[in-house]
Amino acid sequence: MDAGDVVDRLATFPLFADVPRDELEWLVARGEVRACAADTIVLDVGTAIDELLVVVAGSGSLYSNKSGVWRRAAESGPGRVHGAIPYSRGRTSIRRLAVEESATLFALHRSHFTELIRECPQLTAALVHEMIDRARLGRAEELHDERLRSLGRLASGLAHELHNPASAASRSAASLTELLDEAEGAARNLTRSQLNPVQLDALEAVKEACSAPEPPRSALELMDREDEFAGWLERHGIAFSGADALASSDVRVSDLDGLAAALPAPALDAAVRWAASGRNVRAAAQQIAVATGRIHDLVDAVKRFTFMDRESLPGEIDVAQGLADTLAMLQHKSSAKAVDVRLEVASDIPRVYGFGSEINQVWEKLVDNAIDAAGRGGHVTVMVTSRGDAVVVQVTDDGPGIPEEHRERVFDPFFTTKPVGHGSGLGLDLARRAVLFHHGDLAFTSEPGRTVFRVQLPVTGARTRANSSASSP
């Protein structure tokens, strides 16, 4: 392929469609055409970028290394530009460019860039636009990956949070069959006893005491009651492990003494079993209700946190509710790290306007970072107040603070002090972008023992009033 063929080929690509032919000829005259065999790595991560590369024919792919795994980020075909570009500050490659089929590349060394900018203004403009588009796409990919990582972390924590109530509900449901069989067997034996009205009244009194709501008692009180009822059952020859059920009820030993005085021994055994089994059945049903209620609350928190039914639509946002849902999503992490997280909400907090899922991601990033910073046994306080036409959220941790040398870079993309594999450095960048998009402000102060991230968001209507005031004569 001679120089004229390369110029003709470049002119067919959309990127160079408006570039004068004489500028393309200037470019080709100073570069070289290379033939690359299949499976050739043209650029690798960390290698110096010394050349502008244009794919003239054939194809390749761009790969990114994600936690030690190579993943295809994009395909590269004819007309795609890689490597160095005029005005680009990049000096080393952050991706791998590999030729998967045989390809033809055009290469121009960086040493020609100064002359290129001077002699070929339209070609330079086209390449700069390509650089901007490439940076935007790269940033979009990184932000997308960070969102996926964030959702992955939340999903993992949520799975643990759902596991406990789901297991409790399953255990209680499994025990119901045995408990109901016990209660039905005792009821049949009571029917055979043919109790008289006085005996039935004594039985009903004990049954009502067993069915009443459990009064508040300390663990020590429950242990003492259980020992007391176990002794009573043993004295009356009742081989039934129901002392714990009787202890948690409102029944008294004197009530059982009255029942024992009214019933013959066989009927007493059945009566105690029936009353205690009924207590156990109700307790199991209550445990199922509590566990499934917890699952319901968590699912509702997920739905509200993600705004899954209206993610793409802006609206009025209840900041306090969003923070409560965020803490619910992060509860497993805070519990695992033994971090005490408190939410303090002032009264009459106005609503803000915007995209709820994005605002909740801000809270997730800030609280998640605060839990990490606080460390085991630490404390995180989330405070919501209103100030003028703004809602103010402060996330405070009692960790060691942000070192002075890192404070100017806290919001820089890809900057992180976390170990490799534990942070991408995009969390606070994402949070700041979301806050700025909603016309708010995100700032922080830090000293040993107290770091505060402060978010200020305009309340619903404040932006409109501000714009109206600015336009008034």
Image (cartoon, rainbow, N blue to C red):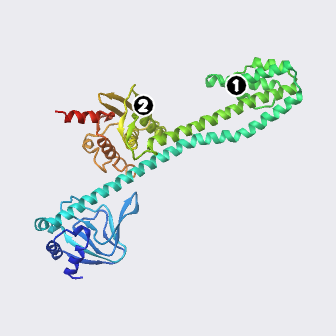
The amino acid beneath tag 1 is Ala
In this picture, residue 255 sits left or right of residue 325: right
Instruction: Give residue 443's quadrant in the image.
Output: top left
Residue 75 position in % (x across, y down): 35, 67
Instruction: Give residue 313's quadrant in the image.
Output: top left
Q: Residues within 10 Å of mark 2 (few under 14, many from 20)?
A: some
In this picture, residue 446 sits left or right of residue 306: left
Quadrant where the N terminus is found in the figure? bottom left
Q: Is residue 233 visible?
A: yes
* Contact flag, marks 1 and 2 (Cβ < 8 Å): no
Label 2 belongs to which residue?
343
As helix, strand or loop, the secondary structure at mark 2 comes to strand
Instruction: Give residue 322's quadrant in the image.
Output: top left
Q: Spot the residue most to the bottom.
A: 2
The amino acid beneath tag 2 is Leu
User: Given this view, does label 1 or label 2 mark the residue nearer the observer?
Assistant: 2
Residue 375 position in % (x across, y down): 41, 38
Question: 313 or 114: nearer the eye?
Answer: 313
Is residue 47 shown above or below 102? above
Label 1 belongs to which residue?
247
In this picture, residue 335 sits left or right of residue 96: right
Residue 130 position in % (x across, y down): 24, 62
Counting residues from the start of the chain, the first of labels 1 and 2 encountered is 1
Q: Residues within 10 Å of mark 1 (few under 14, many from 20)?
A: many
As helix, strand or loop, the secondary structure at mark 1 comes to helix
The label shown at residue 436 is none
Residue 404 position in % (x across, y down): 25, 40
Question: 248 or 173: nearer the eye?
Answer: 173
Question: 309 or 34: nearer the eye?
Answer: 309
Is residue 84 shown above or below 279? below
Q: Distance from label 1 to label 2 (Cα)?
A: 37 Å
